[in-house]
Amino acid sequence: MPELPEVETVRRGLMPVLQGAVVESVEAHRPDLRWPLPENFVERLAGRRIEAVGRRAKYLLADLCGGEVLLLHLGMSGSLRVEGAPARGPETAFHYPRHPAGPHDHVVLHLAGGASVTFNDPRRFGAILMVPYDRLDTHPLLRNLGPEPLGNSFNAEYLARACAHRRTSLKAALLDQKMVAGLGNIYVCEALHRAHLSPLRQAHTLATKAGGATLRAERLVTAIRDVLREAIHAGGSSLRDHRRVDGELGYFQHAFRVYDREGAPCPNFHCKGHVRRVVQGGRSTFYCPACQR
Ligand SMILES: [Zn+2]
């Protein structure tokens, strides 16, 4: 399942192709993904200009002229394929070859100028919606999201305050999208390892008795930002290698330090521990009991 860095990588890959582009025509090969496609989707989108491509948590947001936003979620298995894009500066200095249409190509946007963007999603947990721009913040999918982990309002004071009265594990608190938006299982495990904090630790121990930030909260915010930034950076590199081949945006392989590395020696300097797997809230947690406290 793509997490925030993967979605941000997709956004950066789409931007040079979509920003300022006019949607000439739309193909929809089925009426629904996870939810039904927007009413009159094909007619409503055709002829619209895409002003900007943004992101909120794991949602891609394409601002359309006329005050609507195309909201796209990759779900469990979604990816986007850019084809036929003309060279426009170094980021798109590749001409993507055309592929034969695949069985899971559900939606295709044909852009003026000849490029196309195809949404492929074998498991169909992805979503495409159209939302009026001024109702974006109050939309049910977005209104309860906490701050962006890379944004200014996510800091140690905020995190400590938000955790101060929580009697849950740190892992569960960080996966709560109201606490911080867009973090998933993989990057929570990686960030806790870097911050030397146990995923089993009680969330409220990030706050002092007065509700202020502890050093733990500061370490954790730094670790979260670092793992996300590094993953986005790695995604950018892999994008540049990968897009030359087939223009597909969606997945790339990372070297994780603890995630999915049960039994491996802890990569922290001077630590003699080994990565352990436990199940929390029905999902695997990977951590080093020797250096994460
Ligand atoms: Zn360790």
Image (cartoon, helix red, strand yellow):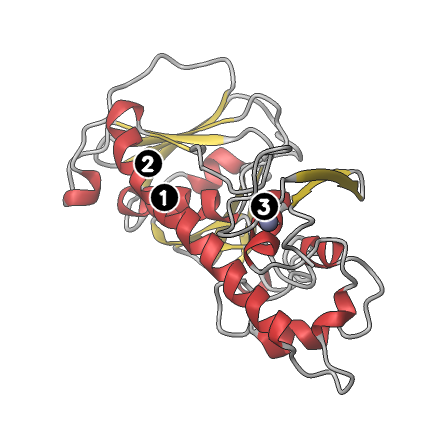
Can you see residue 9?
Answer: yes
User: Which residue type does callout 1 highlight?
Assistant: Ala
The secondary element bearing badge 3 is classed as loop
Residue 46 pos. (x, y %): 40, 38
Residue at mark 1: 234
Numbered mark located on residue 238 in the image: 2
- Name which residue lies at 70% across and 59% down: 293
Find out whether the residues at labels 2 and 1 contact each other: C-beta distance under 8 Å.
yes
- Name which residue lies at 59% across and 75% down: 156
Residue 29 pos. (x, y %): 52, 21
Q: Nearer the viewer, residue 43 or 138?
A: 138
Mark 2 and mark 1: Cα distance apart in space: 6 Å
> Within 8 Å: ligand 1 and the Cβ of disc 3?
yes
Instruction: From the viewer's perspective, tell me whether residue 129 is left or right of residue 225.
Output: right
User: Which residue type does callout 3 highlight?
Assistant: Lys
> Which image quadrant is residue 216 in?
bottom right
User: Which residue type does callout 2 highlight?
Assistant: Ser
- Name which residue lies at 49% across and 73% down: 152
Q: Furthest residue to the bottom?
A: 210
Quadrant (top left/top right/bottom left/bottom right) for the N terminus: top right
- State which mark lies toward you, 2 or 3: 3
Q: Nearer the viewer, residue 250 or 156?
A: 156
| Mark 2 or 3, nearer chain start | 2
Residue at mark 3: 272
Residue 38 pos. (x, y %): 59, 39
In this rendering, is residue 59 above or below 262? below
Mark 1 and mark 3: Cα distance apart in space: 28 Å
